[in-house]
Amino acid sequence: MAVTKSAPAAQTGRKAWIKKTPVEVVLEQIGKQEEKVAEMREELAREERELAKLQQARTVLEAT
């Protein structure tokens, strides 16, 4: 059985792994958290609009 060498990173299409400093790791975590919060705020705004529509429908139904 022949031993094959693994191909260099450039040939496999993957980037070479670069170790991150603790500062870079924390900054990356902050960025991810900011994105998550922004998505959650958008979802909350959609849910609040839906709730407002339903509450308006309830007032119409209760008025009749």
Image (cartoon, grey):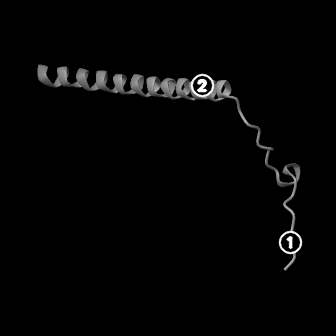
Lateral position of residue 52 relative to residue 11, left or right: left
Density class for disc 2 (Cα within 10 Å; few <14, some 14-19, many ≥20) is few
Residue 47 locus on image (x, y percent): 36, 27
Residue 5 locus on image (x, y percent): 87, 63
50 vs 5: above or below: above
Where residue 18 sits, quadrant-wise, is top right
Of mark 2 and mark 1, the one earlier in the sequence is 1
Circle 2 SS class: helix
Q: Which mark is residue 3?
A: 1
**Amino acid under disc 1:** Val
Residue 60 locus on image (x, y percent): 19, 21
- Quadrant holding the C terminus: top left
Circle 1 SS class: loop
Query: What residue is at 60 percent from the left and 25 percent from the top?
Result: 31
Query: What residue is at 18 percent from the left and 20 percent from the top?
Result: 59
Residue 21 or residue 55, whichever sits in front: 21
Residue 52 locus on image (x, y percent): 30, 21
Residue 9 or residue 63, whichever sits in front: 9
Q: Nearer the viewer, mark 2 or mark 1?
A: 1
Query: What residue is at 87 percent from the left and 53 percent from the top?
Result: 8
- Structural distance between the alpha carbons of marks 2 and 1: 43 Å
Q: Which residue is mark 2?
A: 31
Q: Which mark is residue 43?
A: none
